[in-house]
Image (cartoon, rainbow, N blue to C red):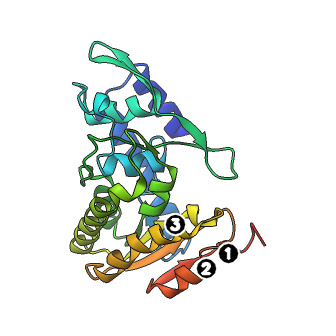
Amino acid sequence: HRELKFLTEKYFRHEIDEEKLQAGAKALRQKRWQQLHTAGIDYLPSNDFSFYDQTLDTAFLLSIIPEEVSQLEVSDLDKYFALARGYQGPAGDIKALPMKKWFNTNYHYLAPKFEKQTTIKVRGAKIFQEFQEAQALGIDTRPVLIGPFTLLSLGEFSDDLQAQDFVPALITAYQEIFTKLKTLGADWLQLDEPALVKDLTPADLALFRALYEPLLAQKAGLKLLLQTYFGDIRDAYETVIDLPFDGIGLDFVEGL
């Protein structure tokens, strides 16, 4: 019944405060986990719940935030919504990030913006908090996160920057996420890489390998599931199966 939509709209209209928004969102997450668990589904995802867009969630988790937004004197949640919807108020005047079509769907995502000032580091806690929320209900989940290759593939780069400039920092940040999730008790992490279904060049495949060879070498004891969707991975298939992923999810409907 679009409960989250109406809840966030109340927040935008200043009819509820952040505490009530967060409490309502938490209740919706818990209701869904309990419904799926009761239905007999063994291994449920977490961190697939979003106020706006999972690509934006991942960028925010990793502090990929335009400088003008990071300097706003508002709460982290309002910085997040400033990226999604723009912000006009006493703290400044911010335009939303550009919205682009999410592969072959009618959904859209907000393109992460990489700048000279971008310093990638784990700043958010959403993925960890939601894993612990499910844990508190007695439900073990598989956290889900947009993978670094797709994040870079969908990003916009200013100041003559390119994706390769951010590879070392992304590897360090993802390894930090691995370690923290394992410490919290996670067994698996699902990394979504739908960008693998695109037409890929040798340079694209080299970028994918440059990211995942070190990540797979230092997983902090986690099992990593590489998940793709929206098409086949004909260009990347040999590269993917050559790497020691613990699981690979493929789309057997689109692209065949």
Mark 1 or mark 3, earlier in chain: 3
Residue 44 shows up from this direction: no
Q: What kind of element bears circle 1? A: loop
Are the residues flagged by discs 2 and 1 in contact, CB closer than 8 Å? yes
Separation of disc 3 and disc 2 at Cα? 15 Å
Q: Quadrant of residue 136?
A: bottom left
- Image check: 124 left or right of 86? left
- Tell me the residue that label 3 is attached to: 203
Q: Position of residue 12 (x, y in %)?
A: 42, 23
**Residue shown at 61%/65% (left/top)?**
200
* Amino acid bearing label 3: Ala
In the rendered image of this protein, does residue 215 appear above or below residue 246?
Answer: above
Q: Residues within 10 Å of mark 1 (few under 14, many from 20)?
A: some
- Tell me the residue that label 1 is attached to: 234
Q: Position of residue 204 (x, y in %)?
A: 52, 65
- Image check: 172 left or right of 199? left
In the rendered image of this protein, does residue 205 appear above or below residue 3?
Answer: below
Q: Residues within 10 Å of mark 3 (few under 14, many from 20)?
A: few
Which marked residue is nearer to the observer: mark 1 or mark 3? Answer: 3
Mark 3 or mark 2, earlier in chain: 3
Q: Going by the picture, which residue comes out furthest to the top? A: 90
- Tell me the residue that label 2 is attached to: 237
In front here: 26 or 145? 145
